[in-house]
Image (tube, helix red, strand yellow):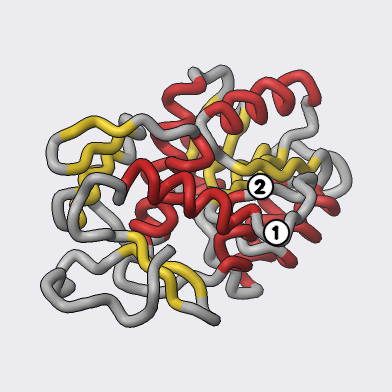
Amino acid sequence: MRVLLVEDNRLLARSLRQGLEEEGFAVDLAEDGDEADHKARTTNYDAIILDLMLPKKDGLTLLKGWRSAGKDTHVLVLTARGGLGDKVKGLDSGADDYLTKPFELEELLARLRALIRRGYQVKDPILKIHDLSIDTAARSVKRAGKAIHLTPKEYALLEFLAFHHGKVVTRSMIWGHLWDEHDESVSNVVDVYIRYLRNKIDKDFSPPLILTRWGEGYMLLGADADTTSPPTGPEK
């Protein structure tokens, strides 16, 4: 999943970015309010992590502006202001969750994952599709009861497909949600990771769950699909 991290403390921003990327998140960074405003309005993020004390434009002003413009991306506010009044003001301005500094990375990750699930209207942290089980909290995967090891990027791709199961997602959608602004676009990188994922998720299992829709994109077989019927379109 792709997130925007808005934090002007470079040491904290670097630490958070590293922790998020190790968990498989694609991370764009903004160090002031103007930069954050531009990126939030021009990129479709899965979530925004927003510090309130920012140069040029403060976090509350950003929040109010995004909500007034109809921007509904889930926002997790980070702030050194821990008073009840500050929390209420942040939530009333449009924040979806609130975390006071200092905090543990594990808590931030848990809150972020919960916001992303909410964004995809998923309440249960465990996604079950046929005999595939994805624990979004533990970031673990099993198929037919067998544990499957995935790299962070492979897991992120599977989770993205699972959030859209039964629906086709285009290569550009996958790229936009799984790679950050500094990654160089390679024409076949999405296809390469789909192949990696198929070798782990579908090889030696039946039915194949990751389908190709030629000219459209990829799809994870819907939970209630008829697995006895052949898929519409070849799989490779």
Q: In this view, does 56 lie above or below 62?
A: above
Q: In this view, does 229 lie above or below 149?
A: below
Query: Callout 1: few (<14), some (14-19), or many (20+) C-alpha neighbours within 10 Å?
Result: many
Mark 1 highlights which residue? 40
Answer with the quarter of the image where residue 222 lies: bottom left
Between 55 and 220, the one lying in front of the other is 220
Residue in the picture at 39% in, 50% down: 198
Query: Callout 2: few (<14), some (14-19), or many (20+) C-alpha neighbours within 10 Å?
Result: many
Which three-letter amino acid code belongs to the residue tagged 1?
Answer: Ala
Q: Is residue 79 above or below residue 189?
A: above
Left or right of 134? Residue 97 is: right
Which three-letter amino acid code belongs to the residue tagged 2?
Answer: Leu
Left or right of 131? Residue 67 is: right
Between 14 and 190, the one lying in front of the other is 190
Q: Are the residues flagged by discs 1 and 2 in contact, CB closer than 8 Å? A: yes
Residue 3: x and y in percent read 60, 47
Between 9 and 144, the one lying in front of the other is 144
Q: Which mark is residue 4?
A: 2
Residue in the picture at 43% in, 70% down: 212
Residue in the picture at 71% in, 56% down: 62
Residue 44: x and y in percent read 62, 63
Question: Does label 1 or label 2 sit earlier along the sequence?
Answer: 2
Q: Residue most toward the right?
A: 56
